[in-house]
Amino acid sequence: MNARPGAARPTEAAALNGAAESEFSGQDSARSARLAFWFAGCLAVTLLLTGASLLVGTSSVETSLAWLLAPDAQSSVILWQIRLPRTVGAWFAGALLGLAGAIAQGVFRNRLADPYLLGTASGAALGVTISLLAADASVTALAWAGKLGITAAACIGACAAIALTIVLSRGVLQTASLLLSGIVVAFLLSAVTSLLLLTKPEVWRTMQVFLLGSTGYLSWSSASLLGLVFVICVIPAALLARGLDALSLGEETAQSLGLSLSLLRLSLLGIVSLATASAVGEVGIVGFVGLVAPHLVRETVTVNHRQLLIGAPLVGGALLQAADLASRWIIRPAELPVGAVTACVGGAYLVFLLWRRSRHD
Amino acid sequence: MTNALPSAHRSSPALACRGLAAGYGARVVLAGVNLDVAAGAWTAIVGANGSGKSTLLRTLAGLAPPQAGCVMLQGRPLGAWPRRERARRLAWLAQSAGATDLSAHEVVGLGRFAHGGWLATPSSEDEAAIRRAMLATGSLPWAERRMSTLSGGERQRVYLARVLAVEAPVLLLDEPTTHLDPPHQEDIARLLLAQARGCGVCVVSAIHDLSLALTADRLIVLGRGAVIGHGTVREALAGDWLSAAFRTRVEIVEHDGAHLWRPRLDAPARD
């Protein structure tokens, strides 16, 4: 088929088109340079935050600086086995949440979508609650819970919640039905968690750490796991990014371009599930990072989905690193729950966005 | 009705349907639709609000399953085409597109998706097709602008360029002149005619504006849940299909060889 649209040209703007043609490549390269500068800026901020996180802890900054300059056996353990894996793990967890948020917003074509929309947070909380209650109930269950660990329990709970959401909505094709099912599952599982906790109030305190989010338990093994999951998630996500671009024009348009909508959505929601479940399993329920990171990217630079799916993890990672640093700094030597810090910062940012939009309107 | 197109086209229509019924859930909007739409002509679908123009287009495009009957694309059942192959042969323009943050160039580039796929970077052939389509619709000046910063008319021209960039032999367009001012509507009508007559493309579009629809080569007139008529504009006027479709007397006047709809403001309002 050799239909040539150029054979038919409206009279309008022929001269303008000619001028635009010569400017076209210049604009394209300027945009690429701006984007490269932006990515470099994000990496620089991450490096700065990583350096700062080595200096902030229960000891003073001066002491930490002295440890850095002249490390001994004890300070080496604190710097390289406690603080560094904590900040690296926080970056990967934030990056996973940022990636999941960007994908969720693309799949649902809704800027208010976040990674927890499909009931993952409630599912993870229920998984952890059941694991803690079981460990308290019998020695055999304790052995099983010990083998499984909090992380695995949270992951299983989150994945089960997503599966339940998809079953309830009878597939992934109906956006409204999927969103509604996610809300129903989230409420249902939260109610079950609350009922279970009522039977054993002593488990509540342990659960609080999980529900408020904490980066304090991150080790090299958990940071490595998060890093591995990040690589597993970000590569297919970037490959599917053109599908998200097409989806942004509408579901029917995407279908008409030759996309299998159900396969695309299922693959993308699979990535959201894996990313969210892993992050929640390691750092608990940390709100707003997945919601705010894609917004911050779009507010500062023009991106398509492939660039967004690289930019949102960079911003998400830096955000959680910064929140982790703030949680250690604000009431030092004690610590704030990192989820509380992200909620305050993220909430304030969204209020700022609303204020700016209303002023713009 | 008679088919004014050459017999060669008649023997292998670009798009056809037999005994087609289309609707939503249990609701039947159109039934018993038999059409042969030839290549090399611009066919406009007209009818009253809710007569099923968009429903027919969506079903012909394979975006909604028919309740009965079948759709044939280039002599082969629509469902028998592999998804990507079908997308290369049939391009679709929705009545309204979603809000997107992409640049105009990226949107038009999506028209080449079925030619390249997930991993392919745009080839020089793709870039040439994108440029041709943007030039044809006059949308090249804002190629690098975000869609959210364009006016409704500018956006519509970009979306139309996206459809042209597919370079498909069949174009299905749902209200392609939405949001456009009269001079731009004229440009698009000229473009569609040139696509059809100059490039041999089968162009089918739902058009709300009667005067604009009458500039097409052929009309499909919908009403009372069925096709009232399918033929040339002269056949439609001779048979007074439009009055039957709109259930009121539709007055068309001829001026300098063009057919124009004249509103009858003195006529009593319809129920």
Image (cartoon, coloured by chain):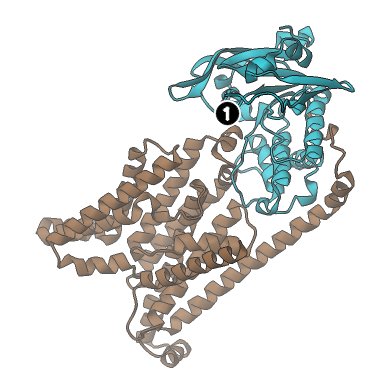
Chain colours: A brown, B cyan
Residue occupying the point 40% across, 66% down:
A223
The picture quadrant where one finds residue B115 is: top right
Residue B14 seen in the figure: no
Task: Identify whether B30 is placed above or below A240.
Answer: above
How far across and how far down the image is residue A245, in percent?
59, 46
Three-letter amino acid code at disc 1?
A: Arg
How far across and how far down the image is residue B236, in percent?
73, 14
Kindly identify which residue carries mark 1.
Answer: B83
Mark 1 lies on a secondary structure that is helix
Chain of the residue where label 1 is placed in the rendered structure: B
Task: Identify whether B8 is placed above or below B126.
Answer: above
How far across and how far down the image is residue B64, in percent?
52, 26
Q: Residues within 10 Å of mark 1 (few under 14, many from 20)?
A: some
| Camera-side residue of A250 and A31 | A250
Task: Identify whether B233 is placed above or below B194.
Answer: above
Residue occupying the point 77% across, 20% down:
B252
Residue A36 placement, left or right of A123: right
| Camera-side residue of B201 and A260 | B201
Residue occupying the point 71% across, 63% down:
A33
Residue occupying the point 72% across, 43% down:
B158
Quadrant assignment for the N terminus of chain A: top right
| Camera-side residue of A1 and B26 | B26
Q: Hey, which residue is sitting farthest left in the picture?
A: A138
How far across and how far down the image is residue B180, in percent?
74, 40
Task: Identify whether A118 is placed above or below A37.
Answer: above
Quadrant assignment for the C terminus of chain A: bottom right
The picture quadrant where one finds residue A331 is: bottom left
